[in-house]
Image (cartoon, grey):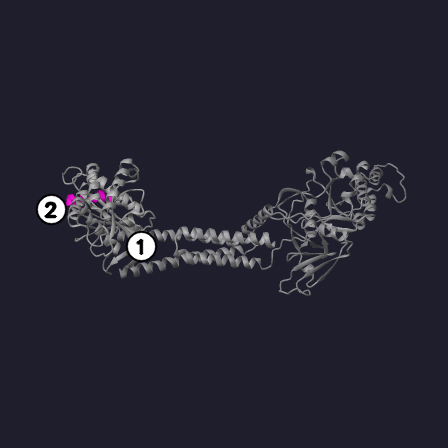
Amino acid sequence: MTLARWLFGRRERREALIVRLYGLTTLIIGLAVATLGQTVLDRLTVLVFDSYQRVQPRAETAAPVVLVDIDEASIAEIGQWPWPRTALATLVNTLGQLGAAAIAFDMVFPEPDRTSLRQVAAELRRVGVTIDLPPSGDAIDNDAILASAFVGNRVVAGMAISNETDGQLSLPKAGFSYGGTDPREIIERFRGGVGNLKILGDSATGLGFFSFPPSPDGIVREIPLVASTHGHLYPALAIEALRVAQEAGSVILRSTGASGEADTGLPAITALKVGDLEVPTGPKGTFWIYFSGLASMPTVSAAGLLDPARRDALESAISGRIVIIGTSAVGLRDLVATPVAASMPGMRVHAEIIDQILGNTYLSRPDWAKGAETLAALSFGLLLILILPRVGALVCAVGTVSFIGASLALSWIAFSQLRLLIDPILPAVSVGTVFAVTMPVLLLLTNREKRFVRQAFARYLSPTVVERLADDPSALRLGGDLRDITVLFSDIRGFTSMSEKLDPQALTALLNGFLTPMTDVLLRTEATIDKYMGDAIMAFWNAPLDLPDHRRRACLAALEMTRVLRTLSVGGGEPGALKVGIGLNAGPCCVGNLGSAQRFSYSAIGDGVNVASRVEGLTKAYGVAILVTENVRAGAEDLAFLAVDLVRVVGRAEPLPVFALLGDAAHAAEPAFRNLAADHGDMIAAYRAGDFAEAQARLSALQQTAPQSLQLLYEAYAKRLDVLLVQGAPEGWAGVFTARTK
């Protein structure tokens, strides 16, 4: 046994080391891959953040913003796009007259208006037609007319910035001041862009870019609030609209190294201020858009503003508001994908940004997030690696799911309560990968160990015990546990005299023919066979496996043993020739591998075992097949029991109530048994009360009606009552019978 323990300990240590090395290698490789720039994990991360926005969208602020939509209805009414710039000039002037705080164009005008009379005249002159025009020509120049409308109103002209063109842009309208590191060294640089005609760019009050930098999956989530191209800084359209609406002159950028900001050595933008509004940003001046859907955002059809009969009614919707002019028409292709919608007009995205800033609700990805996520992945992974070799596959699976659930829960709490974007994917995938790689290794090693245990012990331990040892080889130790078990003893009545008449071969055949079916019955009820002692069997329930109903199982097993025995023909005898006595007791016993260092067996010892043996011996005296103690009966009260006696067995001072088990729950419910139990109870009550004459009268009636299986019991009581009627009740009579033999 000492050698076995040493071998198993060495084997377990080696296997644990192998599993942990696999897990640690997997964790290190996974974290290294995850930190090498853009990976598939980043795609999963933003999809998780998208789902958070769909589950808990931002509460709409009801900001003073209105959308003017060049929609399908407007195109049908005014004509195909592009419209004459004179129509757009009318639109701008109308908005100004209705009190718009700022008018922002989610579009760009890079080419002259082809419908302009000046353009038409130029074309005619090229083909030789002589045309006289006014000296200035502005009256027939649609672009000049629109520029004039720009000058007369607070207009933010839109433009697109891109890395796909080197196009020059008009000089920015907004001034920029900054504290700390020069933001041009930090924010993203673009090659150029697509701007407006110079006359339009120069005439606008503000100039902002409406383009969204491309993302790997084409979904707009995060945009720069300021971009750099050709050495100049340009604000996003939403920022420029807020600046113009507040009549602010410049935008202030705060970066690391500024007063009140720590200089971490990594230059980063921390905030942007436009007018009275301060907006936190990402390290490169980016902004996470937290979408609300803008369910109540007012939207006005452009055609309504161009119709004199309808425009005045729109004053309340326009006055004092920032107006964003854009299009939702499918054919104009100004539709983008967002976390909350597969297709959203670009102007609504800009409106979302303004609404979010005015509502002072921001999402942030803190600079410590990556380190915290890596630390969480490392901690969860190492903890899983630590416990993997110590617990089973199910516990590991539950632990893995718990770690993943904790990552998701903490990430969700950070988003919903603190508006922080913390990635749950890195810790979750790290733990999941460690589990996926190490679990097959652990199962392979565990199965090899189980095969070793089965091969080593299957020949002399019961299958249940072998499986338990296979699942937990550490159970191979001397000593045991205190368990509440039900113990069964049984033996063949008259076996000694029977064996004297049989030769060894016949005796062996008799025992094998008896013990085999009895063992089958016991194993079907998950009993543990402790030992065979000649014709006797000792078995118990609730160890090593937990069986909450072990008392009832033992009773049903005993009943089944007697039923099978009635049909059993052993040694050429008649079926039912063999009779057994079965005793059951329940109580705490020491259960475990008991024996010496050279040889041991899984067994039970204790007072509960001794009492079960004494109870089995009493079956001979009372002539019943099955006797149980009160502890057993209390766990199977629906079965058919009859009180037999209060017995003071050898070795115990306290009297022991014993009961005859006659049948299952169906038998207990039969009217005949209920009547028998009532009459029997009256007889026992009279006997214990010392009313022997009454007890004898009731006993006589019972002997006339009781089944054959109780006749020997009633004969024993009849003899006892005959003596008591003559001698009288002893002093201190309590109805207790003292057994003189074991």
Residue 229 percent coordinates (x, y): 71, 54
**Residue 464 in sight in this render:** yes
Given residues 529 and 442, the one toward you in this image is 529
Disc marking residue 527: none
Q: Which mark is residue 483?
A: 1
For mark 2, give the secondary structure. helix
Secondary element type, mark 1: strand
Q: Nearer the viewer, residue 317 or 665?
A: 665
Is residue 460 visible in the rendered structure shown here?
Answer: no
Q: Is residue 62 above or below residue 130?
A: below
Q: Amino acid at mark 1?
A: Arg
* Spot occupied by residue 251 in the image (x, y as percentages of width and height): 73, 57
Residue at position x 33%, y 57% in the image? 474
Q: Position of residue 322 (x, y in %)?
A: 75, 48
Q: Which residue is mark 2?
A: 497
> Overall secondary structure of the magenta stretch?
helix
Local crowd size for mark 1, using a 10 Å CA cut-off: few (<14), some (14–19), many (≥20): some
For image coordinates 90% across by 44% down, the residue present is 135
Q: Which quadrant does the N terminus fall into?
A: bottom left
Q: Residues within 10 Å of mark 2 (few under 14, many from 20)?
A: few
- Residue 305 found in image quarter: top right
Residue 113 on the magenta segment: no
Q: Amino acid at mark 2?
A: Ser
Q: Earlier in the sequence, mark 1 or mark 2?
A: 1
Cα–Cα gap, marks 1 and 2: 37 Å
* Residue stretch in magenta: 492-520
505 is within the stretch colored magenta? yes
Q: Closest to the observer: 360 or 158?
A: 360
